[in-house]
Image (spheres, helix red, strand yellow):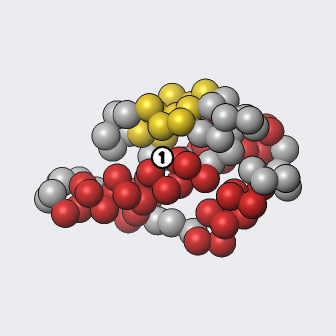
Amino acid sequence: GRTVEERRQALMDDPRTGEVDPHEVRCTLCTKWIKLYKDVEYIESNWLRHAEKCYQRALSSGYEGLTPVFGALNTDYMISAILECRT
C-alpha cells in the first residue's frame, strides 16, 4: 500500500478537494466536509464515492463550469483505496 504521505499528497493534488485533514476533506463543488476512514489517515475511499456522486448531482442540476476532471473516477484506483483501508 501507499504511505500516509503518498495518500495525503494524492488528496492534496485532487482539484476536487479544498482543505485536506487526516480524517476529512472539503469538497470544492458542494463545500461540504467529507469524512474519510476514521482509523487510518488520508484513506480516500469515502471521498472518491462522494466526489463521483457530487459531480453527478451537479450535472443533473445543470451546474455550469464543470470540467471532466470533476467526474473522472478511476475505478481501479478507488478499489485499491478501499482495499488499502482494510489492511
Task: Determine the residue positioned at 33% across, 43% down.
Answer: 29
82 sits to left or right of 68: right
Looking at the rendering, in which quadrant would you find the N terminus? bottom right
Residue 46 vertical placement versus 23 (above, below): below
The answer to whether any part of residue 22 appears in the image is yes
Q: Quadrant of residue 12?
A: top right
Residue marked by disc 1: 15
Task: Determine the residue positioned at 34% across, 52% down.
Answer: 54
Identify which residue, 7 or 78, lies in the foreground: 78
Residue 20 vertical placement versus 51 (above, below): above
38 sits to left or right of 87: left
Q: Position of residue 85 (x, y in %)?
A: 75, 50
Q: Quadrant of residue 27?
A: top left
Identify which residue, 58 or 82, lies in the foreground: 82
Q: Amino acid at mark 1?
A: Pro
Q: Position of residue 25 (x, y in %)?
A: 52, 34
Q: Position of residue 82 (x, y in %)?
A: 68, 58
Q: Position of residue 28 (x, y in %)?
A: 38, 39
Task: Determine the residue positioned at 44% across, 32% down.
Answer: 33
Disc 1 secondary structure class: loop
Task: Determine the residue positioned at 66% across, 66% down.
Answer: 79
The answer to whether any part of residue 8 appears in the image is no
Residue occupying the far left of the picture: 62
Residue 31 vertical placement versus 64 (above, below): above
Callout 1 environment at 10 Å: few (<14), some (14 to 19), or many (20+)? few
Image label count? 1
Residue 79 vertical placement versus 28 (above, below): below
